[in-house]
Image: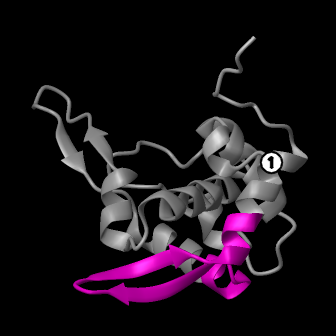
Amino acid sequence: MTTMQDSKPSELVSHAAEELKKAKAVKMPEWAMVVKTGPAQEHAPAQKDWWYKRAASILRKVSLRGPIGVAKLRTFYGKKKNRGVRPEHFFKGSGKIIRVILQQLEAEGLLKKVEKGVHKGKIITPKGQSFLDKAVKKHGSGGTKKTEA
C-alpha cells in the first residue's frame, strides 16, 4: 500500500489540497484573498486555491514533526525579505493564517492538541493519517522509491 512517505511532497500537497476542498470545516475566509502570507512577501498569493495548498502542507508538516505549534510553523513558512540596498533579514510567516488553518483541521478531526512532556502542540490523528494516505492512493503514487529489477 502506498503511504505518505512513499510520495513526493509536492504531489502529496496538491492531491491533499484537492481533497481538502471537499471538507466542510476547511474553508477560505473572505480576508484570505487580499492578505499577504508574511511580512517578507510583496503581494498576496496569485493562486486562487492557495489556502487549501497551505492547509495540506501544514497537515503534512504536522504529520512529520508533531507535536508542533504555530511558532515553529511560522518559522518554516517565513523567508528573507528584500530590503533594497540593506542586507536581507529573515521574517517569520503569518501566524493568523497558520492558526486558523490549524483550528479548521482540528475541527475536521484531522489534528488534535496534545502535551508530550515539555512539548505541546498539534499532532495528526489516525483519521488525518489515513486522509493523507488516501490522497496519495487516489491520485497515484508518484513514488520516490526505486524497485529492483
Name the image quarter holding residue 146.
top right
The magenta-colored residue range is 104-130
Residue in front for this viewpoint, 4 or 122: 4
User: Residue at 32% of width from left, 43% of height from top?
Assistant: 79
Q: Secondary structure at mark 1?
A: loop
> Is 83 above or below relative to 123?
above
Which of 144/52 is in front? 144
The reply, left or right, for residue 74 in relation to residue 19 is left
Q: Position of residue 44 (x, y in %)?
A: 54, 49
| Res 52 visible | yes
Q: Position of residue 120 (x, y in %)?
A: 33, 83
In the displayed structure, would residue 100 be above or below residue 43? below
Considering only vertical position in the picture, is 32 above or below 54?
Answer: below
Q: How many marks?
A: 1
Q: Is residue 95 left or right of residue 16?
A: left
Q: Is residue 147 above or below residue 95?
A: above
Q: Residue at x 76, y 45 (%)?
A: 2
- Residue 107 magenta: yes
Amino acid carrying mark 1 in the image: Met
**Location of residue 41 by image quarter:** top left
Residue occupying the point 61% across, 83% down: 106
**Magenta stretch contains residue 81:** no
Name the side, left or right, on which 60 lies relative to 126: left
Q: Where the C terminus falls, by quadrant?
A: top right
Q: Nearer the viewer, residue 69 or 24?
A: 69
Which residue is at the front of the view, 65 or 39? 65
Give coordinates of residue 28: x percent, y percent.
Answer: 70, 69
Neighbours of disc 1 within 10 Å: few (<14), some (14-19), many (20+): few
Q: Which residue is mark 1?
A: 1
Residue 46 appearing in the image: no
The residue positioned 39% from the left and 80% from the top of the image is 121
